[in-house]
Image: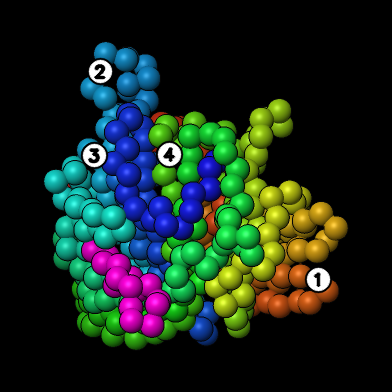
Amino acid sequence: MIVDAPSDDRFHDLQAAGSYEWSYFDGLADDGETGFVAIWFRGCPMSPYYAAAIGRQRRRPESAAALPTDYCAFSISLYRRGRRLFSILEEGPGREFVHRDADVRYGRNAVRTDMAANGMRCHMINVDAALALGRARLAGDIEINALPSGQIAGADGRMLIQERGGHFWVPAALDGRFTARLDLWRAGRGMLKLRFSGRAYHDRNAGSEPLSTLSADWHWGRLHAGDRTFVWFQVRQQNAALPSFQRLLLLERGGLVAGADAWQLEETAPMAHWSTLPRPRSIRGTARGRALAFNAAPRFVVDSGPFYHRMISRIAVEHEGALFEGDGISEYLRPSRLAVAAFRPFVKFRVRRR
């Protein structure tokens, strides 16, 4: 995993078969009740159709290449009190996908990025997404204002970088605020107007090879508490002989005040799940010398599948003897499961392919 500078927040037009890029935004309301996640994909690794094309090309190299431009997608999920209100992943060929630098549009769903007069970076998300057969529609906008990306560098102006592998992470805007103005219409239930605000997060991932080549456990999460933002990211190789990727980041008012790339993650006894991907009941991470540590205990599982779980978690962070806590987001992913053909029928019903 390679950590790129926040200034590299853009699509790179990767062309290799099986490659992928995504731009990710999420937000959780100040009361912890309502949240969203919106993602634009160029080459969607979670698509069962893309996974099948990658597998077919591996078995028969003479078959058509699995190109990222044939599997672009947009996904948005909206949840409240631990339950999903709306969720869609819409996928199609590249003609639906238009991008320039950090701006991107898929169908009628777009994000535009501008620099405000006060130096804040503004991401304006416009949403217009509908489920099949007119069952539900979500429309409106989400405005995210974040501190300038460069401010998350350390005192020496540099990011912590680990240069190995064909997978990339761009921590673009880790500390932001959002305001959502969304209208949700559901058949037989009428219109629900949702107006909520809270803390927001934006990053970007990309890979020059299929994500499923990572035989690893992927843990990611974040917490906003007052002026502080805490992010953890670990891609732990299942083969202990291979190097793992680890990062802890603690920011205050957008500036990096502490970080670690050597820390230990401990999981409690796993909890069984219908997808056969067990999830830890809680996780704890500790950096050397205990100068930085955290504990994350899931409260609600807001999304899950054969290869991942997304949770609202109670997160406590210790830094140099001080403790702060609150509700945040945590995810657990096992990328190698993306290549398992037996799981694809369970994912297809959630994907709307044009």
Residue 102 image position (x, y, % from top left): 31, 58
Residue 111 belongs to the span the image colors magenta: yes
Residue 176 image position (x, y, % from top left): 46, 74
- Which SS does the magenta portion mostly show? strand
- Near mark 4 (Cα within 10 A), the count class, few <14, some 14-19 or many ≥20, is many
Closer to the camera, 168 or 196? 168
Q: Label 4 belongs to which residue?
A: 207
Question: Which quadrant of the view contains residue 202?
Answer: bottom left
Residue at image coords 40%, 64%: 25
- Near mark 3 (Cα within 10 A), the count class, few <14, some 14-19 or many ≥20, is many
Looking at this rendering, what residue extends furthest in the left direction? Answer: 95
| N-terminal label among 2 and 3 | 2
Label 4 – label 3 distance at C-alpha: 14 Å
* Above or below, comparing residue 213 to residue 275 in the picture: above
> Where is the N terminus found, in terms of image quarters?
top right
Q: Label 3 belongs to which residue?
A: 69
Residue 329 image position (x, y, % from top left): 55, 66
Which residues are the magenta region?
Answer: 110-124
Q: Amino acid at mark 4?
A: Gly
Label 4 – label 2 distance at C-alpha: 22 Å
> On the rendered structure, is 37 left or right of 279?
left
Q: Amino acid at mark 3?
A: Thr
Labelled pair 3, 1 in contact (Cβ < 8 Å): no
Question: Which quadrant of the view contains residue 122?
Answer: bottom left
Q: Label 1 belongs to which residue?
A: 320
| N-terminal label among 3 and 1 | 3
